[in-house]
Amino acid sequence: MSDCFSENHRRRDTSEHQQFHSIAREQWHEHSREHAHCRKHPSTASEHLPELSIVSDSAADGEHNVEHAVATGGAVDSSKPGSESVGDLTQRSEELLPVHANGSYPDASDWEGLHRSNVEKAASAAQAGSNLEFFGDSITEAMGYSPSAMQPFKDSFGVDQPTALGLGGDGSAQLLYRLNHGEMQGKPKTAVIMIGTNDLGSLSASQIAENTANSIKSIQERSSNTRVVLMGILPRTDSGDPGNRMVDEANQALSQLATSGGAVQFVNLRNSFVDQSGNQRSELYQADKLHLSAAGYQAWADGLKSALQNTEADSFPGVWSGTGDSPANGNGGDYTPMTPSEASDQSSGALTYKPLNGGSSDGQLTLDTAGIRGVNLSGAEWGKNSSQDSHFWPTVQELDYYKSKGLNTVRLAISWEQFQPTLNGPLDASEMARLDSFLHEADARGMKVLLNLANFDRYTLNHGPNGQGIDHEAQGTVVGSPGLPISAMQDFWSKMVRHVDADASASRAIAGWDLTNEPFNTNGLWPETATAVDQAIRATGDNHTVVVEGDQWARNFSGLEGLAKLDKNVAFEAHSYWDDGSGAYSNPNPPDNVNVGVDNIRPFVEWLKQNDARGFVGEWGVPTDNPAWAPAVTNFIHYLNQNGMGNMVWAGGPGWQSDYTLSVEPVNGQDRAIMSTIVQANNS
């Protein structure tokens, strides 16, 4: 945690940045003043969520008033642990409480009384044994007295009564004070923090993050086994409001507090709370555009549940599949958290979705190649009419459909030319925004994305705008040839990796970096290229799995033995088509040999064994509306399962026409004939 705030994270705003903050601060403080008198704290629970007000933590001139603790530029020193008991709280009359400078608390008595109530709740939670506690401001506070705000979390996590410790108007400094003075008595297994919206326009992003880092430290000092889930600040107002830039800046700073070991996890639900235009989804908010409606709390609970699908077995009293010891015991079984309703479904023979796990004790984000049950989603790599054209980008509908079929991973094809129109130049902002959104949606569903550069180890140097005019086979230049040095692909992947890894949700969604799709006729350069790009990715500090396909359309792995030894977090990917290898299937009927797929992939399996390497099949496909292929598909997937290898079927994506032979996209809501075979084989 100590290295999260080096000097480069504390740099001061430029004059342009300061001017922006000044304008946005005044606009948001005006909004705060309009609502400051509206704060309600009902004494009895109500099914109707009250209209709470925006209460800022700071005066209009931007100075943050926290009188209890040492304040340096708005960041509060956490070195004073304070008292932990309710009784001692009444004896601290000589200590000044962190009153709010905007006048919403004329003196400290109101705030202190509410804080005292929270301390009492924390003490009760400690006696009962606490699994789940929420810390925050008025958004969290409402959970404590509104059943319709709390119920989604009870339903999602199987917890009878999560503890909600929120105070309206509080910011990051007030939360730190509260944690240091009694509100962390419960020592929950999981602590969820949502804080910072009341700091916007008053504190910088780095100050909010520094206060929050100290709050996390306070929690961990009091309960070393508590896992912290840090929520991103939710969007405020609509996309055109300059204040939302402050939200994004604060969330970027907060995301840096996440730890690779999972003790601190950052969850940003922005994409669940805005529409495609970036405006708030009005049904999730109250009229003030800050506080949540009942639907908003449901969306929060759903997003949080999806983000925590790989939690330890004993974090919540939910149902777990599998037999024997829990994952916490380290026996390595395949355990999947399920809600009681999902457990009931499983007992009746319904499909159970199994998230793709990853990670290891050495901090590597190792792809679970044996657990892959996936689909290729194509379309994002196709040329577009304009930079805003996203017609063929895979959608959330694809994610939801394939997840409903038990598939946990998508292989997303992208185009180098579209994402980096100029070699060694910046990544295209429009394409990166679409990618970020897709990764966030996958992460919210507990799915993983294998990012596949669908360029065949080539770049079309004279391509048209927006990826038009690309023909890699006829016009593309092979990486390592004159005009396209290996360093160009290193540059692309280094920039891509750094961008994605800076966003905790997007990074969490990544299954691996698939360096290029189906290299062919590379003049023997592919092993050198793959090794150099792998090392460039490692130089960024990234520890996701690097995925390397064989030469000659992902079939020839000769020359890659050295890379298998150099980087043990590399996985190898083969493609398998059972006609002439092209996947055209001019004869749509299967051969008599029901082991045609097994025979096709066997040499790759043997190569992996000989080189002590991990791998999977990243593409395979048969005519999807011909059920006669079912025996060969079943034998193929069973063979892979027996050898600890996952598979990803070709092809899904919104651009495929219904008559495409290999499309697994449903037609008019009906599954393709082969889908039931895939589902059954994947789960047997």
Image (cartoon, helix red, strand yellow):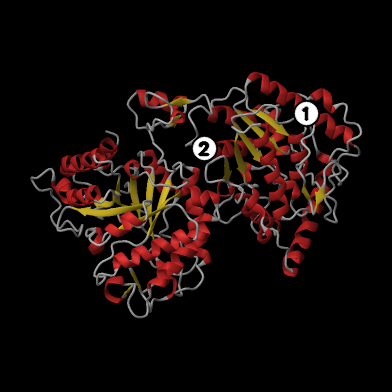
Question: Which secondary structure, mark 1?
Answer: loop
Is residue 249 left or right of 516 when viewed as pictured?
A: right
Q: Which mark is residue 308?
A: 2
Q: Position of residue 364 (x, y in %)?
A: 45, 48
Q: Which mark is residue 330?
A: none
Placement of 633 over or under 551, stated as above or below: above
Q: How many marks?
A: 2
The residue mark sitting in front, 1 or 2, is 2
In the image, residue 153 sits, relative to residue 524, either above or below, namely above
- Image quarter of residue 144: top right
Q: Decide: few, some or many residues near mark 1? Use Cα within 10 Å; few <14, some 14-19, many ≥20.
A: few
Q: Report the residue at 41% width, 40% height from top.
A: 357
Q: Residue furthest left?
A: 592
Q: Determine whether 309 is above or below 614 in the image.
A: above
- Judged from the image, the secondary structure of the residue bearing numbered disc 2 is loop
Rounded to the nearest angstrom, the CA distance separating label 1 from label 2 is 32 Å
State the quadrant of the C terminus: top left
Q: In this rendering, does residue 48 appear at all?
A: no
Say whether residue 429 is left or right of residue 681. Answer: right
**Which residue is painted at 47% across and 30% down in the image?**
328
Rendered location of residue 21, percent (x, y)? 75, 61
Q: Name the residue type under label 2.
A: Leu
Location of mark 1 (residue): 42
Query: Farthest top residue?
Result: 127
Residue type, label 1: Pro
